[in-house]
């Protein structure tokens, strides 16, 4: 998360997102099938009236476990108390670590919060294996008046998402996987589980002039707005000075599309498996001969940047014969024995 004195922006070409009438209408379902991002309005879902007092009343009694950082004691607090930390204390994470749970503060798929499922209907395309979380951030608690941004990333759970803004305003930029070559995506083999889940360019655009060649969708999110993005789409938020609350739903897609990022993701997963798993991957990777490390990183870079590798339509004999535009013919020189 970055903090900026002025509202950050980026030089990419901005498009507006297709808008649909109904989050589960035929139009939305077709866009989901085609992996196209869209926006719409909350309308009938009761969650348009969600607020902190409402959540405290409905699920405030549910007990949560934390580890107090000061003395490593396990403590139990109510969800109501936890919600107050989220509301008033931007530094709560430095004082209390979640014990026995990871992920969003309130996971709506968790049976102990099941009562919240009365407030919305899961769209028909949400598969059985789904998850949802309520996220809360108090950007108002920032006395310096700086703008916080959530750096450009794709979700490491590689799930498509519905993002529902309940309170506060923010700007969202969405980049499709084919924009990855412009985003300063660095092969980064020592962070499990995915090499390229962060695009550094979006945190410091002046270091990456090629971002000006990218195209993104720009969305001003206000309460009641829903945005859908498919798996492997980069998203980058800049939060206004508001109390922010949103619900995020995501689910396992029935299949993956082959694109630059799914290819590099599959490659890195295979690589990690071949090296014995993600645990301690950085050490295992750096134990490899240097020229092997260089080659492995180079392969991933090609999956992200070389249009011939992942675009089936580009993969014609004519194009290969015409000089292998983008094909690296110097790939690997074995070490001298
Ligand atoms: Fe995300």
Image (cartoon, rainbow, N blue to C red):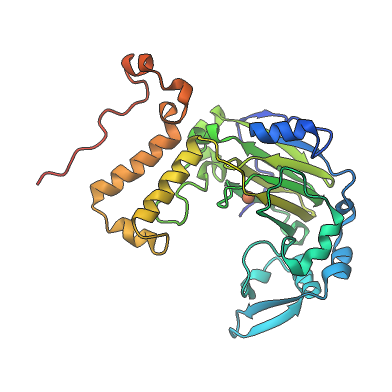
Q: In the image, 246: left or right of 69? A: right
| Res 22 → quadrant | top right
How many marks are shown on the rendered structure?
0
Q: Quadrant of the N terminus?
A: bottom right
Residue 100 sits above or below residue 255 on the image: below
Given residues 260 and 242, the one toward you in this image is 260
Q: Residue at x 33, y 14 (%)?
A: 322
Q: For residue 202, say whether it is visible.
A: yes
Give the percent coordinates (x, y) of residue 29: 73, 35
User: x%, y% of residue 278?
Assistant: 42, 60
Question: Is residue 315 or residue 174 the one in the foreground?
Answer: 315
- Quarter of the rendering containing residue 106: bottom right
Residue 248 coordinates in the image, percent (x, y): 72, 52
- Above or below: residue 58 compared with residue 166: below
Name the residue located 47 percent from the left edge and 55 percent from the top edge.
Answer: 193
Front in this rendered view, residue 46 or 181? 46
Where 71 falls versus 79 (above or below)?
below
State the residue in front, 177 or 216.
Answer: 177
Image coordinates of residue 95 in percent, x first then y, are 64, 75
Tell me: 195 left or right of 9: left
- Is 263 placed above or below 52 here? above
Is any part of residue 184 visible from this angle?
Answer: no
| Residue at 37 percent of width and 50 percent of height | 271
Q: Residue furthest left?
A: 337
Q: Residue at x 71, y 31 (%)?
A: 30
């Amino acid at each position: 998360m970055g903090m900026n004195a002025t509202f950050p922006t980026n030089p990419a070409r901005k498009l507006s997102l297709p808008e649909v009438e109904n989050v589960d209408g035929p139009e939305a379902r077709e866009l989901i099938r085609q992996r196209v991002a869209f926006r719409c309005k909350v309308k009938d879902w009761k969650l348009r009236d969600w607020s902190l007092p409402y959540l405290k009343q409905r699920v405030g009694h549910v007990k949560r476990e934390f580890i107090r950082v000061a003395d490593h004691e396990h403590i139990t607090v109510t969800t109501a108390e936890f919600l107050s930390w989220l509301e008033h204390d931007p530094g709560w994470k430095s004082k209390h670590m979640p014990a026995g749970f990871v992920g969003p503060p309130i996971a709506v798929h968790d049976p102990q919060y099941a009562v919240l499922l009365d407030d919305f209907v899961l769209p028909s395309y949400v598969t059985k294996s789904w998850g949802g979380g309520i996220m809360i951030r108090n950007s108002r608690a920032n006395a310096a008046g700086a703008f916080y941004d959530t750096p450009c990333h794709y979700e490491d759970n590689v799930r498509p998402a519905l993002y529902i803004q309940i309170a506060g305003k923010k700007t969202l930029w969405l980049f499709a996987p084919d924009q990855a070559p412009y985003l300063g995506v660095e092969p980064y083999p020592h962070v499990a589980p995915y090499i390229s889940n962060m695009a550094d360019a979006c945190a410091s655009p002046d270091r990456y002039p090629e971002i000006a060649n990218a195209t993104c969708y720009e969305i001003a999110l206000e309460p009641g707005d829903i945005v859908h993005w498919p798996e492997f789409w980069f998203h980058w938020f800049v939060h206004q000075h508001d109390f922010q609350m949103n619900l995020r739903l995501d689910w396992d897609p029935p299949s993956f599309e082959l694109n630059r990022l799914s290819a590099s993701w599959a490659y890195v997963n295979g690589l990690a498996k071949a090296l014995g798993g993600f645990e301690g991957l950085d050490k295992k990777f750096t134990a490899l001969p240097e020229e092997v490390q260089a080659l492995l990183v180079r392969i991933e870079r090609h999956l992200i940047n070389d249009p011939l590798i992942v675009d089936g339509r580009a993969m014609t004999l004519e194009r290969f014969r015409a000089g292998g535009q983008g094909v690296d013919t110097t790939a690997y020189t074995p070490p001298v024995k």
